[in-house]
Image (cartoon, grey):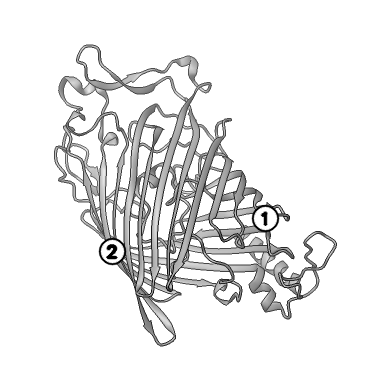
């Protein structure tokens, strides 16, 4: 952690020295830096606000669950609310205070004389009582002629779908959908990318396309405290591709718009044992069950497909009385997991995990509706939101419901609670009296599908969670006089 703080101090120091004249910034290494009007900035603060941006926020919350983290029901007990509402509760506690996120981001954006962004650099970390994790550390070089084509490298948000790269500070619910948390935990990846993005001055529509090659293991993931992945244990790299487009119209003081996209993830998981299980029909009973298709010859030589498809569409209307948002996202594909979980297996540090693989076809997604209300009080606007969200995750779409059986003579089928579908109905209220403070009250009602698995014939499990969150947020962008220079085609800034 000391190394990251030292690096941050060096970056800030270098930025201040650059504005004092010790370091000169050039567009093409031949002319001194000027702003888009051709004028030299008048003072240090003006220059810092134009190109450097500092963002910081913290989310402190109190949560109350229906159960403790471990409930002694059945022969071995079962996990209570699981990990999907901010992390697993203590086995003996049903409520807690949690510093869910504590993030600081320093970014630098440089534009040339044509007012085109040609350099983007960012460093962001997340510090909580549990861990210190780098969330962003990347640079992007953009062509200086038309400002559309860029080359990016480092640690950056996965360009997949809507929720995974969304900013948690502005998200309507406390957490992303269960399918996103399972398939793509911790939001970030390490790799290189080609980015095609319309510049801010291009106002006809918004367009962005990403083609990324990444490690695939994520950042800050791995078993055990402190045993995070520092690289990757396999030779194969993963590909993430995304195309998104947005358009906005203005009419009588109101804005109407949409944005949508399609994403594709192509990766693989290395076979590390002789056992690979796929769902196949049993010749004797005609029932689907897991069959071992692995061989000893495939150990450390064969990869199994990890493939996702994502589609989303968001409709948004911003008018004097409020903002209405309707969004739907669907993810389908193939996920290699384990017998006890549908996340990809990871080893300690860079060691290969020793897990039998279970190959599952899955589907999941979320539908979100938010109605925000604006209330003008003197010189500022108070925002109040009402949100309803429905999300689902079906880890094994080939078989479900009462066909999930693990008792009697059918125990050899290998089906378990890992293959069970979950639905979550979330609803909440938020109030933002000022940009720097947000209060959120949210309740997640979690439902598991009825199965023929022992102890899971009905939705008896009490795993609902109440979250009361306070968020404090600061952003130097507020003081940037050019922040409203161009239209926001996607209306991503809600307040």
The answer to whether the residue labelled 2 contacts the one labelled 1, judged by CB atoms less than 8 Å apart, is no
Question: Which mark sits nearer the N-terminus, 2 or 1?
Answer: 1
> Distance of mark 2 from mark 1, alpha carbons?
40 Å
Measured as percent of width and height from the top left, residue 268 is found at 49, 31
Q: Who's the residue at 76% across and 75% down the image?
A: 40
Left or right of 130 on screen, residue 112: right
User: Within 10 Å of the Cα at label 2, are there few (<14), some (14-19), or many (20+) other Cα atoms?
Assistant: many
**Mark 2 = which residue?**
428
Up the image or down, 166 lies above or below 386; here it is above
Residue 65 lies in what quarter of the image? bottom left
> Does dot 2 land on a helix, a strand or a loop?
strand
Q: Residue 249 location, x and y as percent?
A: 46, 63
Residue, far top: 284
Q: Residue at x 60, y 68 (%)?
A: 53
Q: Is residue 144 above or below residue 283?
A: below
Q: Quadrant of residue 433?
A: bottom left
The residue drawn where x is 56% and y is 63% is 105
x, y percentage for residue 448?
Answer: 22, 43
* Label annotation for residue 147: 1
x and y, in percent, of residue 251 in the image:
43, 69
Q: Nearer the viewer, residue 233 or 75?
A: 233
Q: Residue at x 41, y 18 (%)?
A: 294
**Looking at the image, which residue sits at the far front?**
252
Residue 491: tell me if it is visible.
Answer: no
């Amino acid at each position: 952690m000391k190394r990251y703080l030292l690096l941050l101090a060096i970056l800030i120091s270098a930025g201040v020295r650059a504005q004092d004249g010790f370091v000169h910034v050039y567009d093409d290494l031949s002319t001194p830096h000027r702003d888009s009007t051709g004028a030299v900035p008048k003072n240090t603060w003006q220059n810092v606000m134009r190109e450097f941006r500092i963002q910081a926020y913290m989310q402190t919350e109190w949560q109350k669950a229906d159960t403790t983290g471990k409930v002694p029901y059945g022969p071995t007990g079962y996990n209570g609310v699981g990990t999907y509402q901010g992390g697993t509760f203590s086995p003996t506690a049903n409520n807690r205070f949690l510093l869910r996120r504590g993030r600081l981001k320093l970014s630098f954006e440089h534009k040339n004389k044509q007012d085109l962004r040609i350099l983007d650099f960012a460093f962001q970390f997340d510090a909580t009582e549990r861990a210190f994790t780098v969330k962003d550390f990347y640079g992007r070089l953009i062509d200086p002629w038309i400002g559309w084509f860029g080359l990016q490298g480092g640690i950056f948000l996965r360009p997949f779908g809507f929720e995974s790269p969304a900013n948690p500070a502005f998200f309507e619910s406390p957490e992303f959908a269960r399918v996103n948390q399972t398939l793509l935990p911790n939001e970030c990846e390490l790799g290189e990318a080609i980015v095609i993005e319309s510049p801010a001055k291009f106002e006809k529509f918004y367009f962005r396309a990403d083609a990324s090659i990444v490690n695939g293991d994520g950042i800050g993931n791995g078993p055990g405290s402190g045993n995070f992945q520092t690289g990757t244990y396999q030779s194969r790299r993963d590909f993430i591709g995304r195309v998104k487009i947005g358009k906005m119209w203005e009419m009588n003081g109101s804005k109407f718009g949409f944005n949508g996209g399609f994403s594709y993830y192509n990766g693989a998981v290395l076979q590390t044992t002789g056992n690979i299980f796929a769902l196949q029909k049993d010749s004797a009973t005609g029932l689907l069950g897991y069959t071992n298709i692995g061989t000893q010859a495939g150990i450390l030589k064969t990869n199994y497909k990890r493939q996702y498809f994502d589609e989303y569409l968001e409709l948004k209307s911003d008018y004097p009385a409020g903002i209405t948002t309707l969004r739907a996202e669907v993810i389908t594909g193939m996920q290699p997991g384990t017998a006890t979980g549908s996340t990809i297996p990871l080893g300690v540090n860079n060691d290969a995990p020793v897990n039998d693989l279970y190959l599952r076809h899955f589907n999941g997604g979320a539908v979100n509706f938010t109605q925000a209300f604006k209330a003008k009080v003197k010189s500022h606007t108070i925002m109040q939101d009402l949100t309803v969200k429905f999300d689902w995750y079906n880890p094994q779409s080939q078989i479900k419901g009462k066909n999930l059986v693990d008792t009697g003579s059918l125990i050899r089928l290998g089906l378990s609670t890992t293959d069970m579908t979950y639905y979550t109905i979330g609803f909440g209220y938020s109030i933002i009296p000022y940009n720097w403070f947000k209060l959120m009250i949210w309740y997640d009602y979690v439902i598991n599908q009825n199965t023929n698995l022992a102890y899971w014939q009905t939705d008896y499990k009490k795993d609902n969670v109440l979250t009361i969150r306070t968020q404090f947020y600061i952003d130097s962008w507020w003081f940037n006089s050019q922040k409203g220079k161009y239209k926001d085609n996607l209306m991503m800034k809600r307040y």
